[in-house]
Image (spheres, grey):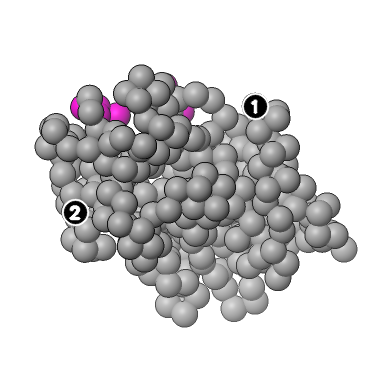
């Protein structure tokens, strides 16, 4: 019998997750189906409950519901370490004793940066833009690599709150003037609306990596990074595939090979 999974978001039509998990299933011989589900902005919990009642085995969670997902666990032991720290989740397992929550974003990002892009994080100066669920999910794993992290956000109080929680640095956009970083990660959804975070000139150190978690198009952030001389500019497609592989492993107990999937998706861009 085919096991059913889904990804929940709003918007969701752009998602490549159904194709990724289809390729994972074919590669590993797993009998699964996977679809994209649009949830109303005020209907995330109801959508999850509907999927559970219809017999789905689990789901992924994307913008803007990762922090909403944190509220779903009915027992503390159903929260993974990363979820406890981030207060955000992107992977749900539906089990008989409730919804089990995980966050695979951080490990997915690290695998993409280090294994696929060849940029090692230890001792690097990292600027993380954003304070939502996407940013929350990667701070703790980034810290464990030995990177030095600074968080910035339009609402600077949110950046300061996150910095206190994770014991990292924070600052306003204005305070970035005169500073430079080895790795700049855009964890906001600004690319979806073709907006640009208000970064100052000179933010990229020599040999810097500019990384946008959005994927599927060249964002204003990526264009700015190229104009500013960033050595490597990448979208988040590799992260998407790597975090999906971690979710797939949690659900199925089999770890797929991500490289051929990333290569196939790149050819379609």
Q: Nearer the viewer, residue 251 or 77?
A: 251
Secondary structure found at label 1 = loop
Q: Quadrant of the N terminus?
A: bottom right
Closest to the observer, 29 or 158: 29
Q: Which residue is mark 2?
A: 169
The residue at the point 65 percent across, 76 percent down is 96
User: Which region of the structure is painted magenta?
Assistant: 192-200
Q: How many marks?
A: 2
Residue 197 highlighted magenta (yes or no):
yes
On screen, 240 above or below 97?
Answer: above
Q: Is residue 183 magenta?
A: no
Give the image quarter of residue 3. bottom right
Does residue 134 appear anywhere in the picture? Answer: yes
Neighbours of disc 2 within 10 Å: few (<14), some (14-19), many (20+)? some
Q: Residue furthest front?
A: 206
Q: Residue at x 42, y 27 (%)?
A: 222
| Horizontal relation, residue 261 to residue 157: left or right | right
Q: Is most of the magenta stretch helix, strand or loop?
A: loop
Percent of width and height locating residue 95: 64, 73
Question: How many neighbours does mark 1 have within 10 angstroms: few (below 14), some (14-19), or many (20 or more)?
Answer: few
Q: Earlier in the sequence, mark 2 or mark 1?
A: 2
Observer-nearest of 40 and 173 = 173
- Tell me which residue sits at (71%, 45%) in the image: 261
Q: Which circle marks residue 269 in the picture?
A: 1
Using residue 5 as the reference point, say whether residue 157 is left or right of it.
left
Q: Could you tell me residue 240's position as x and y percent?
A: 57, 46
Q: Are marks 2 and 1 in contact (CB under 8 Å)?
A: no
């Amino acid at each position: 019998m085919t096991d059913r999974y889904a990804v929940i978001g709003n918007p969701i039509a752009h998602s490549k997750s159904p194709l990724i998990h289809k390729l994972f299933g074919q590669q590993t011989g797993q009998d699964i189906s996977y679809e994209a589900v649009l949830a109303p902005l005020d209907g995330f919990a109801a959508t999850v409950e509907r999927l559970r009642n219809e017999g789905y085995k689990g789901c992924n969670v994307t913008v803007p519901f990762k922090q909403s997902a944190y509220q779903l666990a009915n027992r503390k032991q159903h929260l993974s370490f990363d979820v406890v720290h981030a207060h955000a989740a992107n992977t749900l397992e539906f089990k008989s004793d409730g919804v089990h929550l995980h966050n695979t974003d951080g490990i997915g990002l690290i695998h993409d940066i280090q294994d696929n892009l060849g940029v090692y994080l230890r001792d690097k100066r990292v600027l993380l833009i954003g304070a939502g669920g996407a940013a929350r999910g990667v701070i703790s794993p980034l810290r464990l690599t030995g990177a030095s992290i600074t968080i910035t956000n339009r609402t600077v109080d949110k950046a300061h709150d996150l910095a206190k929680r994770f014991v990292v640095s924070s600052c306003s956009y204005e305070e970035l003037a005169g500073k430079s970083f080895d790795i700049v990660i855009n964890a906001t959804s600004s690319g979806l609306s073709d907006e640009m975070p208000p970064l100052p000139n000179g933010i990229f150190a020599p040999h810097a990596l500019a990384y946008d978690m959005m994927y599927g198009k060249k964002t204003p952030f990526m264009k700015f990074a190229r104009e500013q001389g960033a050595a490597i500019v990448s979208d988040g497609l590799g992260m998407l595939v790597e975090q999906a592989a971690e979710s797939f492993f949690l659900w199925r107990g089999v770890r797929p090979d991500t490289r051929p999937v990333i290569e196939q998706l790149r050819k379609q861009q």
